[in-house]
Amino acid sequence: MAAERPKIMVVGAHADDVEILAGGTLSKYHARGHEIVYVMSTDNMSGGVHTLQPDGTITTTYEPPELMSARRKRECAAAAALLGTTPIHLDHPQRHYRDAGAVEHELRYGCARPDFVSPEVPSILTAYEDAASAARLTDLILEQDPVCIITHDLAVTSIEHLATVLLVVNSFWRAVEQGFEGAMLQGREDDLVFGELNARWDTFVDITETLDQKMQLIGCHACQ
């Protein structure tokens, strides 16, 4: 029986985060035989469709949350396919969405959700403190048993990136308590808080050879 391929798991908050955060690294190690486990923490129901016009300008249009979520998941699937995998969606609702009239609505504690969003799944903002959500990701980590988990930086300004890494960290340590021996890396992001001291490099992966592949992965996404 052939030996099982080593796995790298990456957990991103939104469609395109995986590719921006670690697209070059994932392309590099996929080419070297690693299996990629592509995980999305949110349901991707928020965002806009960006279209490049002939004059070089970009127009942005909005869709109802169920259509936006489906569109962004299709983009995830297209990018993940280039890495030989399919996305795993945890489907935690984002903190806001736009209705058919492009009016933005924010999900606060106890507020109404779009009809397609399950009331049983906590918002990404509170998923890290929800025992069932942490247990689900812990089980996924133990099941996949990656050699490394890559996720966002704790010092980011995006609240949904921060909430995602809190969920990952919580689940990671739960998995370690149950015998998981893989590593966890938090990718450096451009928008930082708390100063440079909290986001210094301690691991560097040279992606010179796979930069074009990274740009191809990012190009699968037209929404943000």
Image (cartoon, rainbow, N blue to C red):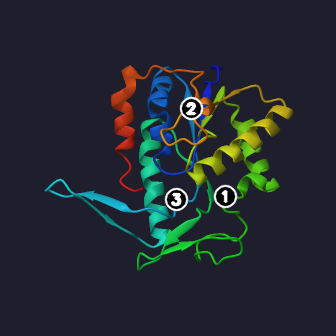
Specify the label residue 125 is tagged with: 1
- Nearer the camera: disc 2 or disc 1: 2
Q: Is residue 39 above or below residue 213?
A: below
Frontmost of labels 3 and 2 is 2
Question: In the rendered image, which residue does mark 3 sit on?
Answer: 44
- The secondary element bearing badge 1 is classed as loop
The residues tagged by marks 3 and 2 sit, at their Cα atoms, a distance apart of 29 Å
Q: Residues within 10 Å of mark 2 (few under 14, many from 20)?
A: few
* Residue 43 % position (x, y): 57, 59
Give how far apart the Cα atoms at labels 2 and 1 are: 24 Å
For mark 3, give the secondary structure. Answer: loop
Alpha-carbon span between mark 1 and mark 3: 14 Å
- Residue carrying label 2: 196
Residue situated in front as seen by the camera: 116 or 99: 99
The three-letter amino acid code for the residue at tag 3 is: Asn
Q: Amino acid at mark 2?
A: Glu
The answer to whether marks 2 and 1 mark residues whose Cβ atoms lie closer than 8 Å is no
